Amino acid sequence: MISYGIYTTWDSKSKELPKIQEFTTLIPAQLDKEFGFIVKIKKAKGEQVRFCIYHPDIPDDDGEVMPPFEGIEHIDDNEWKFYLGDTIWAPVSNKTGNWRMTLEMQGKVVAEKIFTVFE
């Protein structure tokens, strides 16, 4: 893990990763606050990683608790950097609590961080 905490806004269409603004696991519940971590994985070209973001029981538009956000990324470089993060969206009042972010490779957790979003 290279860095974790609060970042500049991430543009998912850009190859540029967001820039670290503050190393922390305490995240103020503010609209559009970007947080997460960046990892660098070496010598794993061709492998894949599974990422997962566990939200603190945030309800969806129907009032149901949102499932974790997860997916697969393919490593396409021998020195691969990856940003796993999220941002606070409206209403901010239901985003407080612990957010757990994990990155797995070959069934093993290779990076994990818990962020506490507070008002």
Image: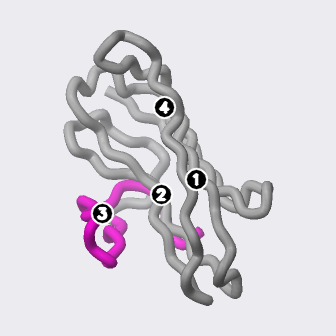
Distance between the alpha carbons at the discs numbered 2 and 3: 11 Å
Q: Pointers 3 and 4 in contact (CB under 8 A)?
A: no
Mark 4 is surrounded, within 10 Å at the Cα level, by few (under 14), some (14 to 19) or many (20 or more) other residues, namely many
- At mark 4, the secondary structure is loop
Q: Quadrant location of residue 15? A: bottom left
Locate residue 66 relative to residue 70 in the image: left or right. left
Write down the residue under mark 4: 55
Mark found first going from the N terminus, 3 or 1: 3
CB contact under 8 Å: marks 2 and 1: yes
Q: Earlier in the sequence, mark 2 or mark 4?
A: 4
Of mark 2 and mark 3, the one earlier in the sequence is 3
Q: Nearer the observer, disc 1 or disc 4?
A: 1
In the foreground, 89 or 115: 89
**Whole-percent x, y for residue 103 in the image:** 63, 56
Q: Amino acid at mark 1?
A: Phe
Percent across and percent down for residue 68 are 53, 34
Q: Which residues are magenta?
A: 1-20
Provide the residue designation for mark 3. 12
